[in-house]
Amino acid sequence: MSSILEFQNITKRFGDVTAVDNVSFSIKNGEFFSLLGSSGCGKTTLLRIAAGFEKPDSGRVILNGEDITDLPPNKRPVNTVFQNYALFPHLSVWDNIAFGLNVKKKSSEFIDQEVHKMLQLIQMEEHAHKRPNQISGGQKQRVAIARALVNHPSLLLLDEPLSALDLKLRQKMLMEIDLIHDEVGIIFLFVTHDQTEAMAVSDRIAVMHHGKVEQIGSPMELYEAPKSSFVAAFIGDTNFLDGKVIKKISEEYSLLNIDGLSTNVRCYNDKKIRIGELIHMSIRPEKIHISREQPDNPDINVLQGVVEDIIYKGDHTKFWVRVDDVRLSILKPNSRFILDLSTITWGEQVWIWWHEDDSYMLERYSETDTNLTELPSETIGEAEFVEVEEHE
């Protein structure tokens, strides 16, 4: 697929604050692309620049090969769906969807045909003559999407479109938006602070932080192979362990001395971090196994510890295990009927282990990056930050 939307060296400042800092990337035709980050990271500013509501201080926006940086919003083949729906309260669902086509003075026959298509797409034919105050929040959001799509834009911008809905409705609407995207096949540029939303529907995600793009990739790439500690902490739950490389085992693997652990661990080293360098090691809770029995496998890291806390969550159980001076979170799926099993309990000595391929070496956080208040509320308390003194 060819690139259809390009941000070229976009910078935008508001007074002394740099909201977007020299950002460049492109989006392919038909992609569902998300801008993900916490408040103030620059994602909404970038979306507003694409829409024409903000003009960058420097850089260009290219759409379908045309420089649209200086075009006003109404001259761009772009439509936006806002958080608050922005429907006209005095117009019916039908007339809200038809509004843009009426402004363009399209024929009545054409308008009837296009609005009917949109009503079918959002499955709201029976609500066509209701007003916004007579339909639910999720239905209002569908109408807002239909009103934007009826103009056949090259690009649909979605600015936190689900934030006003409750959890169950958000989940339902997310799947509906994804189905609509599959049906119309244009670029959807989706802005959200919610990693779960972005992971569920995106072909690719740009994780933003302090006005910069930390990493762009598929949901799987971001989760399994984060390129920075910020991305590892922001996307899902992880354990961070500080340490340094003490030995090269092979071209791909190194031995690490982890602060607070008496046992050295093996780790995949795709970044070619050298002996003596300080690192963060990231290991996802579901990658760690837990058992009363000691495993026997030369390719895994094996540690012994004590269970300090347990949370049963139905489909899985989360354990916190103390190993020497380090506390690790572990996620164990409940794939069997556990009432018939002898389950691990508080205070038990257990063995934990993970494969050397499943841990990941990253650069150390800077002091500003370790500020957990910058992460979304659903992330705070998930990442395990192990604070121990560094070995010089």
Image (cartoon, rainbow, N blue to C red):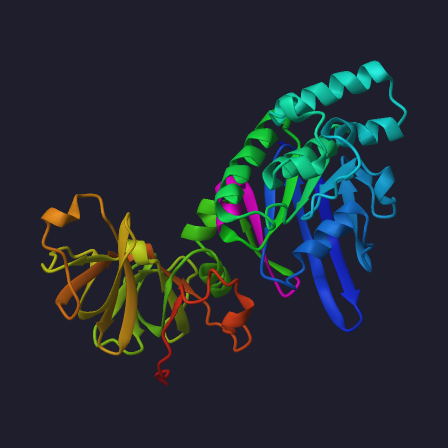
Q: Would you identify the image quadrant in which residue 158 lies?
A: top right
Q: Residue furthest right?
A: 105
Magenta includes 316? no
Is residue 123 depicted above or below 389 in this figure?
Answer: above
Which quarter of the image is occupied by the C terminus? Answer: bottom left
Name which residue lies at 71% across and 50% down: 47
Q: Which residues are magenta?
A: 196-211
Number of numbered callouts drawn: 0
Q: Please give left or right for residue 129 compared with residue 346 in the image.
A: right
Task: Residue at 28% x, 49% y: name it.
Answer: 314
Q: Residue at x 17, y 67 (%)?
A: 346
Residue 267, how many percent across, how many down? Answer: 31, 61
Q: Residue furthest top?
A: 109
Residue farthest to the front, as pictured: 134
Q: Position of residue 148 (x, y in %)?
A: 73, 34
Q: Height in image: 127 above or below 107?
A: below
> Left or right: 18 with respect to 345?
right
Closest to the observer: 309 or 57?
309
Would you say residue 60 is visible in this rendering?
yes
Percent across and percent down for residue 63 are: 76, 39
Q: Position of residue 48 (x, y in %)?
A: 75, 51
Question: Along the horizontal axis of the image, is 107 left or right of 152?
Answer: right
The quarter of the image holding the N terminus is: top right
Q: Is residue 154 visible?
A: no
